[in-house]
Image (cartoon, rainbow, N blue to C red):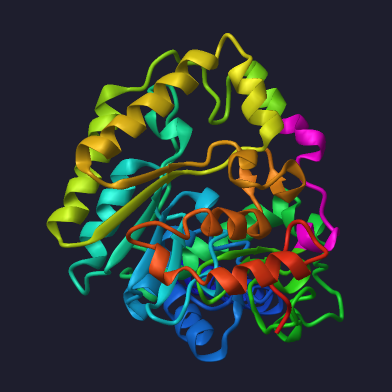
Amino acid sequence: MSWKRWNYLFFTMFLASTISIISTCEYLLYRFNENLDINQSVEKQINENIIYGRLLLGQDAIYKIKMTKKLKPEIVAVGSSRVMQFRHEFFNNTLTFYNAGGVMPNIDRGIEFINDITKEYTPKIVIIGIDLWSLNGNFNEKDDIKRDLIESNLIQRRLFLYGSLFNNLTNGNIRKLGAGLFSTVNYQELLDPFEHRRTIGLLAAINGDGFRSDGSYQYGGIISGKVINDKDFKDTHRRIVNGVSRFEYASEVDRKRLNKIIKLIDLLKNKGIQVVVFAPPFAHEIYEAMNNSQNHKKFLQSFHMSIKQVCKQENVNFYDFSDVTWYGSNDNETIDGFHGSETSYAKLALAMKNDSILGRYINKDQIIQYISKTNNPKYCIPIQ
């Protein structure tokens, strides 16, 4: 075989293999309802009130930034996943609301978020949830946000999705969800099994897990009882005992991190934005476990004192909701040991009904009605 013929054969085989791999990936992305990019998803969700629950993309912070810029809400909730249960129904129609929970895995990312969105618009009020571990110098949140994912070219974005698809196929995540490669089910056409909305993404299509158009997170699998999470808070207790995964041992807050909170508050105030700060809730059982632990008690006390002093010094309203029972909720109204449910957050919002900044915008009567009529401790707003 001549050298020229060999090269031609090699190139043909390479091209055929490449086309085959790309075609297979594109087919699976389509089959698994994961084929849209973030920009397309944002437009589709806003226009069609779709629930967004992606398994493969894993770039929720970028999605939330894009949604915030697009909607330009007047009230924005900022924090980690622990603030995601604020819903727009908790507020009246005087001002628009969006839940940007997830954009602030650490304070630096929160500062970046505010600087980013205020290039385009300025919200009137920002509600900040400050996590206990945000001030723990022994904890470091992994920051794997690919900030160039939106601006990169089509090939780069697709390669990212193909890699994620391969990882989730090999580690069994797709199989665990029950998404079969050759199933006759068309996940593109599946409705959210909990609230029956149209869906973007495999998590939304199968379990009803994902972000609503107001940015709040719907734990469809947990709410419906299909998914059991952190049963008896065993996983959270394990973290506390072993000092891992957000519950690292520490005795005092990290002063550098506390100063970053001051920097974030000052940034907001200097832009004319009103600020309300709160400490998100733990289940009562979990809070008591930390408070009774020699490895956590001092840090817990240091956190309470420090964040309260900072907010007083900065003249911003602060609410310590570290224990769900402090605002009339209970452990049945939690998602796990350190995430309150939307029922719990309805009560949390109601506890701020007399706030000098938020009070006039909280829909007190509607929240009370939701709470009184719900028969699910993790879900309080009737399906529309």
Is residue 105 rendered magenta in the image? no
Point out the stretch of residues depicted in magenta.
Answer: 221-235
Relative placement, left or right, of 302 versus 264 is right
Residue sitting at x 46%, y 31%: 133
Relative placement, left or right, of 25 versus 127 is right
Q: Quadrant of residue 117?
A: bottom left
- Please state which of residues 27 and 236 is positioned toward the viewer in this rendering: 236
Residue sitting at x 26%, y 37%: 312
Q: Position of residue 272 (x, y in %)?
A: 16, 62
375 up-or-down from 301: above or below: below
Residue sitting at x 49%, y 22%: 300
The furthest residue to the left: 270
Q: Main secondary structure of the magenta part?
A: helix
Q: Quadrant of residue 289?
A: top right
- Please state which of residues 147 and 70 is positioned toward the viewer in this rendering: 70
Q: Position of residue 44 (x, y in %)?
A: 51, 86
Q: Position of residue 33 (x, y in %)?
A: 66, 77
Relative placement, left or right, of 376 versus 299 is right
Quarter of the C terminus within the rendering: bottom right
The furthest residue to the bottom: 47
Q: Quadrant of residue 341?
A: bottom right
Task: Decide if residue 379 is in sight here.
Answer: yes
- Please state which of residues 365 and 130 is positioned toward the viewer in this rendering: 365
Residue sitting at x 37%, y 44%: 318
Is residue 224 rendered magenta in the image? yes
Task: Decide if residue 65 is in sight here.
Answer: no
195 up-or-down from 181: above or below: below
Relative placement, left or right, of 9 versus 206 is left
111 up-or-down from 45: above or below: above
